[in-house]
Image (tube, rainbow, N blue to C red):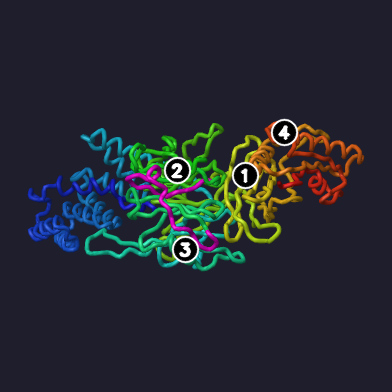
């Protein structure tokens, strides 16, 4: 659940609350009016009893009797702060300083903080400078005020150097009279999930609020967003749900739920799997991930194995930090690890969003230098995989108000945020905007389609594995939907990849994507037919590589070959033939010989990995069995292939 900041004015509020204590109401007052003094003392008594309306009326009467009654202005400023009326508080403190600037020196600091929080940076800068002009300022106060001065100067510089920002309201399909907060969008930008927060109902006690938060979902149909509907049970419950993240493939939800019977702290993180049009019952991530404190705002990496989140647990750098946990091969989440001082500060860090490129992290912070209460930042990994110090997203994306979260699409050129300052239909609405170049992540595209049984056409739940061909490391793992067979796999446009699709009882499917030198983010759409394991079933080993006119296996081929080895060991009754094929360039005899030697190279590798040679055979067919035209390079590339053929299933 989003940690909505309920202490936005806390720093200003604390010194303000001491005004009444430092200005003794029982000593002689600055007014000469008995009626003003009587109304002031009535106001003091009502204020101490938290009867704010009565106190306000009494203080206004006191000021009406004496327009230069400085104590009345100061206490009225305190009252407006207590009741979250910042603009009225600013007016009251300004009047107090105008009447007698030397009467209560801390008023300059209080007023400066208020003006800073309202984005009145030039005025705030003047107040802080005046405050430091006085003697007997403590070193602690001087340090805090100098930081506020630095923030004012930073904000003024940002305003003088704005970043491109042209927000567009998402419209009536998404936004309403209630509050909407952006959560997630799938890599193909066809499903949008967000939180709706009903307007608070104010009770008798000032500041008390009750609210209801639920998830809503919208789909893009013919280029337009459908009317949002509740995501439904079991994700939404009578309690509050918020701060959701969606895996890039759209198959996994991670949500925050608070005060549940199976929770470990005030708020915990849960996960759910998509099953066609519904979701499974959310499961708590467990005590290793969730603590006895507040754990919230999850964001999952594109490989589905690293979960970033915010937490107030002990062992961090501030009141809330960004942490991460990793899903291991043993089906367990690791003990959370703090992202460190390049990300976290002694103040609050919130709402992490890891982009599908897995190299760029966006989040909100109150600790790094910003425009106001909380700003949005982005950071990238260096070549050693370490997070760099964050960069402020800039004005006018960031303002004096609290900017809490941002979501960036897979392509990286568009972002979504929630705001109440941009002409919203309600209080908070969701907006989209073009993200300027410097803040964009690395390019990411995607592969989308369906998996089905080649013989029956029935949809299949299959395992997807995307591997970096240069390192052999898994970059993405996913599953197709068990009911529809649909899948969506993110492809970061920075490397060349091997894709393997597998399911028990079927031949695996392989493909490769040469994206390292690509200059396009055009998505790939492909339906994948898996063949049941039976005699005559054939699959192309698309990640077996040879140099031109060579038959020595290239190192990248080991990724696919090791997959074949594991398949053969798991299905230890199968007998297979490795079939080599070429295009039509060159003589038939040459091509037949080349294809034979390439098939033999694969045969030898499998035999060297303890696959019995009695289960293996190989043959070269040269150009005699084309599967595409030889008149184009694309067709010839398809014809140059290595096939895996089942010849017997004992």
How far across and down, in percent of the image, does residue 89 sit? 26, 55
Circle 3 residue: 231
Circle 1 residue: 466
* Distance CA(mark 3)–CA(mark 2): 43 Å
Magenta-colored span: 275-301
Give the mark, 3 or 4, whose residue is nearer the N terminus. 3
Circle 2 residue: 157
Contact check, label 3 and label 4, Cβ < 8 Å: no
Q: Is mark 2 on a helix, strand or loop?
A: helix
* Distance CA(mark 1)–CA(mark 3): 30 Å
Residue nearest the observer in this picture, 337 or 14: 337
Nearer the camera: disc 4 or disc 1? 4
* Distance CA(mark 4)–CA(mark 2): 67 Å
How far across and down, in percent of the image, does residue 433 sit? 53, 55
Give the mark, 4 or 2, whose residue is nearer the N terminus. 2
Circle 4 residue: 607
* Distance CA(mark 3)–CA(mark 4): 52 Å
Q: What residue is drawn where x is 38% and y is 55%?
A: 257
């Amino acid at each position: 659940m989003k940690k909505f900041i309920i202490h936005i004015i806390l720093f200003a509020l604390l010194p303000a609350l001491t005004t009444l204590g430092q200005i003794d109401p029982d000593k002689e007052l600055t007014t000469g009016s008995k009626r003003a003094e009587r109304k002031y003392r009535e106001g003091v008594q009502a204020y101490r009893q938290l009867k704010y309306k009565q106190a306000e009326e009494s203080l206004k009467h006191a000021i009406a009797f004496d327009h230069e009654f400085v104590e009345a202005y100061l206490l009225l400023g305190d009252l407006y702060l207590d009741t979250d009326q910042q603009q009225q508080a600013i007016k009251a403190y300004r009047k107090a300083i105008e009447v007698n600037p030397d009467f209560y020196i801390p008023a300059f600091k209080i007023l400066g903080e208020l003006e800073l929080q309202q984005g009145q940076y030039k005025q705030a800068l003047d107040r802080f400078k005046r405050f430091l002009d006085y003697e007997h300022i403590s070193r602690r106060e001087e340090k805090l005020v100098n930081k506020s001065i630095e923030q004012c100067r930073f904000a003024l510089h940002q305003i003088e150097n704005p970043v491109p920002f042209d927000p567009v309201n998402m419209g009536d399909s998404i936004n309403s009279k209630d509050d909407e907060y952006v959560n997630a969008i799938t890599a193909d930008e066809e499903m949008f999930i967000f939180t709706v927060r009903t307007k608070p109902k104010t009770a008798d006690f000032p500041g008390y609020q009750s609210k209801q938060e639920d998830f809503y979902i919208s789909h893009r149909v013919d280029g337009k967003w459908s009317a949002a509907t509740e995501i439904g049970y079991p994700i939404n419950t009578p309690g509050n749900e918020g701060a959701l993240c969606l895996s890039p493939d759209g198959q996994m939800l991670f949500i925050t739920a608070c005060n549940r019977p199976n929770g470990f702290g005030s708020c915990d993180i849960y996960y759910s799997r998509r099953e066609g049009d519904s979701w499974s019952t959310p499961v708590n991530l467990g005590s290793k991930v969730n603590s006895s404190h507040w754990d919230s705002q999850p964001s999952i990496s594109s490989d589905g194995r690293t979960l970033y989140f915010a937490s107030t647990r002990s062992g961090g750098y501030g009141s809330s930090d960004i942490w991460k946990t990793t899903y291991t091969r043993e089906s367990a989440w690791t003990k959370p690890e703090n992202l460190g001082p390049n990300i976290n500060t002694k103040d609050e860090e919130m709402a992490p969003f890891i982009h599908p490129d897995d190299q760029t992290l966006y989040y909100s912070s109150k600790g790094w230098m910003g425009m106001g209460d909380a700003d949005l930042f982005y950071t990238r990994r260096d070549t050693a995989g370490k997070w760099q110090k964050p960069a402020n997203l800039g004005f006018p994306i960031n303002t004096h108000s609290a900017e809490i979260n941002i979501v960036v699409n897979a392509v990286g050129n568009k972002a979504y945020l929630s705001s109440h300052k941009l002409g919203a239909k309600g209080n908070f609405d969701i907006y989209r905007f073009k993200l300027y170049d410097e803040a964009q992540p690395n390019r990411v595209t995607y592969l989308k389609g369906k998996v089905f049984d080649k013989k029956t056409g029935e949809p299949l739940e299959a395992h997807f594995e995307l591997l970096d061909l240069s390192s052999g490391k898994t970059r993405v793992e996913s599953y197709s939907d068990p009911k529809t067979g649909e899948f969506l796999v993110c492809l970061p446009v920075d490397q060349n990849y091997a894709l393997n699709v597998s399911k028990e009882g079927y031949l695996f499917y392989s493909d490769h994507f040469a994206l390292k030198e690509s200059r396009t983010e055009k998505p790939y759409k492909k339906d994948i037919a898996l063949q049941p394991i039976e005699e005559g079933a054939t699959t192309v080993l698309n990640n077996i590589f040879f140099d031109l006119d060579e038959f020595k296996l290239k190192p990248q081929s080991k990724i696919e070959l090791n997959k074949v080895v594991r398949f053969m060991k798991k299905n230890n009754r199968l007998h297979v033939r490795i079939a080599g094929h070429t295009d039509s360039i060159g003589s038939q005899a040459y091509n037949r010989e080349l294809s034979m030697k390439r098939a033999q190279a694969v045969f030898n590798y499998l035999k060297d990995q303890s696959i019995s040679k009695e289960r293996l055979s190989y043959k070269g067919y040269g150009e005699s069995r084309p599967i595409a035209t030889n008149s184009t390079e694309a067709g010839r590339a398809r014809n140059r292939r290595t096939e895996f053929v089942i010849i017997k299933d004992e």
